[in-house]
Image (cartoon, grey):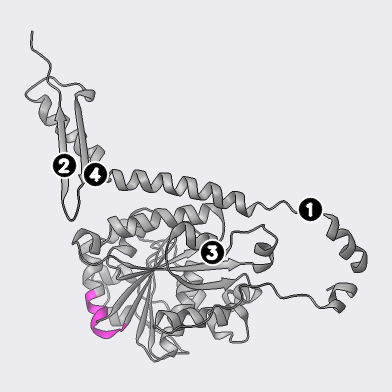
Amino acid sequence: MARIIVVTSGKGGVGKTTSSAAIGIGLALKGHKVVLIDFDIGLRNLDLIMGCERRVVYDFVNVINGEATLNQALIKDKRVSTLSILPASQTRDKDALNKENVGKVLDDLAKEFDYILCDSPAGIEAGAMMALYYADEAIITTNPEVSSVRDSDRIIGMLSSRSRRAELGLDPIKEHLLLTRYSPKRVAEGEMLSVEDVEEILAVPLLGVIPESQAVLKASNSGEPVILDIESDAGQAYQDAVDRLLGETVDFRFLVAEKKGIFSRIFGG
Amino acid sequence: MALLDYFLRKKEKQVATASKAKERLQIIVAHERNKRNKEPDYLPQLTEDILQVLRKYIQVSDKSLSVNLDKKDGDLNVLELNIELHDEK
């Protein structure tokens, strides 16, 4: 049985695509067959974050319209052979997707892959609803910031009312909280909501905490998902999140600000 | 300069805004959840549709119809319709 996981958030710009790319690579590196689907029809970006933008020939909507087969549209990752990407279309209208045709594509993918990761568009419109409809699990990507937390709560409501699992009265979607752009220093100074604050407000089990990191921009600049930067704090935090997704118990890291040494305090830097 | 900054910074009193954020979020999220749980998305449209059907046969004002969905214990949901009929003169 393939696990269908939606990476969602409500609010835009909180790190859905960055997280999808990192977690997709992480799962594939563990030997699982993974497909990453970009549901952001019209605003394709997962290809760019994955570094395969120049290899896109056919896309999700081509497959839906029968203009290409799944195998023609899927892009095999050059770094991890068990990972494929299904890019979003750049131009077609958003109404191309509906429950029937998306369901059929997911059924076909489920025969071949262990994990189907759906990178949701921002918002609560049709595109985001399509991305979450078939999900078994959801990774709710949230920044420790008021508008992001509130929007995440809206999306949690949608997961429990607008998904296939809700409509059929099946077990609810398993929710995971992924807190991104976390700055322990600012939390310590009382300027930023803490992990515990966000957990308490949203009441969703914590999958990972990704620290605010320069490595994330570097990764997207070069099309190498940040999890491949194994020296970086964000890369390691994503690795921990992947391990937890696979059922391992891993201690949380990067939750406390590094103390500055006496020398850097005196001499600056 | 770093040395000077170090001593000056100690004196600045940080205003902790995170606790304010948490408080505001707890209130608004609880409020929105409450609304969400009480009323399914389809209820306003359902009310409107029922009103239109009723108006084919009788005169009713918007206020004379109330539609409520109540969650009872267990798996039981009760959809309650209250239609107030006025005496015809």
Q: The residue tagged with tag 2: helix, strand or loop?
A: strand
Magenta stretch, overall SS: helix
The residue that label 3 is drawn on is A196
- What distance separates the C-alpha of mark 2 from that of mark 3? 38 Å
Tag in front: 4 or 3: 3
Residue situated in front as seen by the camera: A165 or A24: A165
Determine if marks 1 and 4 fall on one subunit: yes
Number of callouts in the render? Answer: 4
In screen coordinates, is B10 left or right of A99?
Answer: right
SS for callout 3 = helix
- Dots 1, 2 in contact, CB < 8 A: no
Mark 2 or 4 closer to N-term? 4
Chain containing the residue with disc 3: A
Q: Is residue A157 above or below residue A88?
A: above
Q: CA distance from mark 1 to mark 4?
A: 50 Å
In the displayed structure, B28 sits above or below A126; it is above
Disc 3 marks a residue whose amino acid type is Glu
Look at label 4 and name its amino acid.
Tyr
- Residue under pointer 1: B13
Mark 1 or mark 4, earlier in chain: 1
Q: CA distance from mark 2 to mark 4?
A: 12 Å
Q: In the image, which disc is placed on residue B42?
A: 4
Q: Picture quarter containing residue A105?
A: bottom left
Tell me which corner region of the image, top left, top right, bottom left or bottom right, holds residue A172: bottom left
Q: Residues within 10 Å of mark 4 (few under 14, many from 20)?
A: few
Identity of the residue drawn at 15% across and 34% down:
B81
Q: CA distance from mark 1 to mark 2?
A: 56 Å
Identity of the amino acid at label 2?
Answer: Leu
Point 54% across, 60% down: residue = A197
Residue A162, percent from left and from top: 28, 56
In which chain is the residue bearing label 4?
A: B
